[in-house]
Image (cartoon, rainbow, N blue to C red):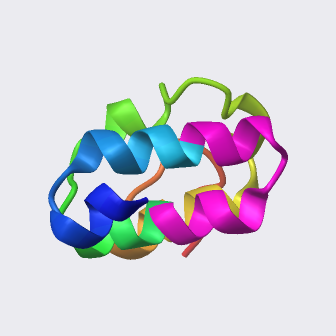
Amino acid sequence: ILSTIVDKNDFESYRKIISLSAIDQDNATALFYLEKMLQNGYKELESLYNIEGTLALRISKEYNNVIKKYLKTSKYFMVD
């Protein structure tokens, strides 16, 4: 977590936090860091659907809505 404060573009650290949070079933924290990562300019759509331990989370409406908000598209739940 500290590395994301020091370097807002350390996207690998965001991915690790999202992974660990999802594995711990702490979806609120995972979604928080997903949004922070996207706010800081992360653009790799496909890699957001390959974060270890996030299967249940990444097919959720909440996860896809956050992605769509910043990248204008998502893999699941194509909402307007």
Judging depth in this view, the residue of 68 and 10 nearest the camera is 10
Span of residues in magenta: 19-33
Judging depth in this view, the residue of 23 and 78 nearest the camera is 23
Quadrant of the drawing holding the C terminus: bottom right
Q: Where on the picture, by quarter, is residue 64? A: bottom right
Please give the name of the residue rendered at 39% of the width and 58% of the height, measured from the top-left corner: 73
Taking the image as shown, residue 39 lies to the left or right of residue 24, namely left
Please give the name of the residue rendered at 75% of the width and 58% of the height, measured from the top-left corner: 27
Q: Where on the picture, by quarter, is residue 47? A: top left
Please give the name of the residue rendered at 58% of the width and 37% of the height, measured from the top-left corner: 19
Judging depth in this view, the residue of 53 and 58 nearest the camera is 53
Q: Main secondary structure of the magenta part?
A: helix
Quadrant of the drawing holding the N terminus: bottom left
- Residue furthest front in the image: 2
Q: Is residue 37 magenta?
A: no
- Residue furthest right in the image: 25
Q: Residue 29's spot in the image, x, y percent? A: 66, 65
